[in-house]
C-alpha cells in the first residue's frame, strides 16, 4: 500500500469519526429512555404510600356506606 493511499484512508476515517461525533440523532431516544427509567423509579418509591392512602380512603367510604340504614 502506498503512502498516499494510506493517507487517504486515514483521512476518510477521520472524516467518518468527526461526522459520527456530530451526529445527535440517537440522543433523543437515550433521553427518553432515561426519563422513563426515572419515572419507573419514582413509581416504585411512591406506590406503597399511594396504595396505603387509597386503601384508607376506600375503607372510610365503605364504613360510611355501611353506617347508612
Image: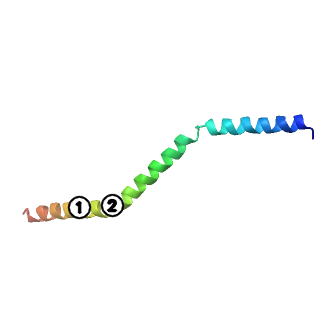
Whether residue 50 sits left or right of residue 17 in the image: it is left
- Residue linked to disc 1: 53
Whether residue 29 sits left or right of residue 48 in the image: it is right
Helix, strand or loop at label 1? It is helix
**Residue visible at 46% across and 53% down?**
37
Q: Marks 2 and 1: CB-CB under 8 Å?
A: no
**Residue visible at 19% across and 60% down?**
57
Quadrant into which the N terminus falls:
top right
> Closer to the N terminus: mark 2 or mark 1?
2
Q: Between residues 56 and 44, which one lies in front from this camera angle?
A: 44
Q: Between residues 51 and 29, which one lies in front from this camera angle?
A: 29
The quadrant holding residue 62 is: bottom left
Number of marks:
2
User: What percent of the width, then of the height, locates residue 58?
Assistant: 21, 61
Q: Residue 64 carries which label?
A: none
Q: Which residue lies furthest to the left in this view?
A: 69
Rendered position, 8 above or below 42: above
Whether residue 61 sits left or right of residue 44 in the image: it is left
Q: Which residue lies furthest to the right in this view?
A: 1
Mark 1 surroundings within 10 Å by alpha-carbon count, few (fewer than 14), some (14 through 19), many (20 or more): few
User: What percent of the width, then of the height, locates residue 29?
Assistant: 54, 43
**Residue visible at 15% across and 63% down?**
60
Rendered position, 48 above or below 3: below
Quadrant into which the C terminus falls:
bottom left
Mark 2 surroundings within 10 Å by alpha-carbon count, few (fewer than 14), some (14 through 19), many (20 or more): few
Q: Between residues 37 and 52, which one lies in front from this camera angle?
A: 37
Rendered position, 11 above or below 41: above
- Residue linked to disc 2: 47
Q: How far apart are marks 2 and 1 (CA)?
A: 10 Å
User: What percent of the width, then of the height, locates residue 66?
Assistant: 12, 65
Whether residue 61 sits left or right of residue 47 in the image: it is left
Helix, strand or loop at label 2? It is helix
Amino acid at each position: 500500500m502506498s503512502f498516499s493511499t494510506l493517507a487517504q484512508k486515514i483521512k476518510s476515517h477521520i472524516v467518518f469519526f468527526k461526522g459520527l461525533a456530530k451526529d445527535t440523532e440517537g440522543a433523543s431516544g437515550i433521553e427518553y429512555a432515561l426519563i422513563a427509567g426515572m419515572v419507573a423509579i419514582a413509581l416504585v418509591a411512591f406506590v406503597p404510600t399511594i396504595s396505603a392512602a387509597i386503601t384508607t380512603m376506600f375503607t372510610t367510604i365503605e364504613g360510611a356506606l355501611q353506617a347508612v340504614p
